[in-house]
Image: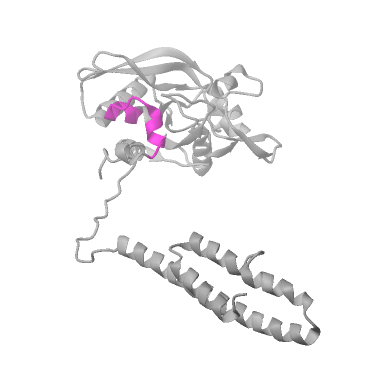
């Protein structure tokens, strides 16, 4: 039988010869495993008398501790070697120039958003903002779409948990038109004691939500609503304001604009606004750009205005649609994929 001193020497030799962790574990099993040399020695103690068993057990345990110490030392040596190899492979040359940090820039849709605000502010329009979680009254009923009205099916949306103070459902707004009623109502209340109420001139850009998704539609998109109400505002003013906006936004006078009769519950008469470029790859092609019309008398009443005295127009345009036309982008989904290769084409 091999002496215990020889077992320690053999274990150290085998451990030192292990080239990696797997080989080291195999070597460990030969000495400390279930059928290992020291384990078998411990099992054989049962055949000895108590005094001899006590002395032999102490000696075996001492040898076992020495073997475990050699095992742990080799484990640490192998770990240190792996670390050194990794450090050498990942060494950094501190004398090399540092990596440059690219400058960020506005998303192309946000560029359009800011440009639209700037253009309308320059002609006297205010800019309003409001909640994206809207109640049934402002999103539908106040805009002449009462419950069970078929026009509601034109704007399927996402409803959220909870109800408003009138026990009506809450939803993600389908357009920024609710801000027309919110802003106009506040404007009327603010000027209730004035002999002559100042005109209401406002745009409301913001995020909106509908159950819609393809190359030209997204469940979430950005829209800008415009509203101008006074005692003497005509459809001709709508045409002039919006045509001037398009020419300023696209930086060209070579734009034709037409108004096609359409239907919207919150305007009457209503129209779709189309435009056509006079040059470029889209030259001569009519493109739908906005919906518009004269504010419906019911909507005026819900704003707190007398439709016999006040008149005005409203329009709504998708900011993504304007962006796509301005930059020649064919797929709306590119705006939401966060692909740096796409976004880097719009530097600051």
Residue pushed farthest front? 1
Residue 95 rendering spot, x and y as whole percentages: 19, 66
State how many labels appear: 0
217 on left or right of 241? right
Quadrant holding the N terminus: bottom right
Q: Would you place residue 178 above or below residue 34 in this image?
A: above
Residue pushed farthest right? 50
- Chosen colour scheme: one colour
Residue 220 rendering spot, x and y as whole percentages: 48, 33
Q: Would you place residue 244 above or below residue 91 in this image?
A: above
Residue 75 rendering spot, x and y as whole percentages: 49, 69
Q: In this view of the protein, can residue 318 be seen by the observer? A: no
Q: Would you place residue 292 above or below residue 39 in this image?
A: above
Residue 237 rendering spot, x and y as whole percentages: 35, 24
99 or 116, nearer to the observer = 99
Quarter where residue 116 is shown: top left
Q: Residue at x 59, y 28 (%)?
A: 140
Quarter where residue 89 is shown: bottom left
Residue 91 included in the magenta stretch of the image:
no
120 on left or right of 181? left
52 or 236, nearer to the observer = 52
Quadrant holding the C terminus: top left
Q: Residue at x 77, y 80 (%)?
A: 48
327 on left or right of 201? left
Q: Would you place residue 240 above or below residue 53 in this image?
A: above
Predominant SS along the magenta part: helix
Residue span colored magenta:
322-338
Q: In this view of the protein, can residue 221 be seen by the observer? A: yes
56 on left or right of 312? right
240 or 341, nearer to the observer = 341
Q: Residue at x 59, y 32 (%)?
A: 158
């Amino acid at each position: 039988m091999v002496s215990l001193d020889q077992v320690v020497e053999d274990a150290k030799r085998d451990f030192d010869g292990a080239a990696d962790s797997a080989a080291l574990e195999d070597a460990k099993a030969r000495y400390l495993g279930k059928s290992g040399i020291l384990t078998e020695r411990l099992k054989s103690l049962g055949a000895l008398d108590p005094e001899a068993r006590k002395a032999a057990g102490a000696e075996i345990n001492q040898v076992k501790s020495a073997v475990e110490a050699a095992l742990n030392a080799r484990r640490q040596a192998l770990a240190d070697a792996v670390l050194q190899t990794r450090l050498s492979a990942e060494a950094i040359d501190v004398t090399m120039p540092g990596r440059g940090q690219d400058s960020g820039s506005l998303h192309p849709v946000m560029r359009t958003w800011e440009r639209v605000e700037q253009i309308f502010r320059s002609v006297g329009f205010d800019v309003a903002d409001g909640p994206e979680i809207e109640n049934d009254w402002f999103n539908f009923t106040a805009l002449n779409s009462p419950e069970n009205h078929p026009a509601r099916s034109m704007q399927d949306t996402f409803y959220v948990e909870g109800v408003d103070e009138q026990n009506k459902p809450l939803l993600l707004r389908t357009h920024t038109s609710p801000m027309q009623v919110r802003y106009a109502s506040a404007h009327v209340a603010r000027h209730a004691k004035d002999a002559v109420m100042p005109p209401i001139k406002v745009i409301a850009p913001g995020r909106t939500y509908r159950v819609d998704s393809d190359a030209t539609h997204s469940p979430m998109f950005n829209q800008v609503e415009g509203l101008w109400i006074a005692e003497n505002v005509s459809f001709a003013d709508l045409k002039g304001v919006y045509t001037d906006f398009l020419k300023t936004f696209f930086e060209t006078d070579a734009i034709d604009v037409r108004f096609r009769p359409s239907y919207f519950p919150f305007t009457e008469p209503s129209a779709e606004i189309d435009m056509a470029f006079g040059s470029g790859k889209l030259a001569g092609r009519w493109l739908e750009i906005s919906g518009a019309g004269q504010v419906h008398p019911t909507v005026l009443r819900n704003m707190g205005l007398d439709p016999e005295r006040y008149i005005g127009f409203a329009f709504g345009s998708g900011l993504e649609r304007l962006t796509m036309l301005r930059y020649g982008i064919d797929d709306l989904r590119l705006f939401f994929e966060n692909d740096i290769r796409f976004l880097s084409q719009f530097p600051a």
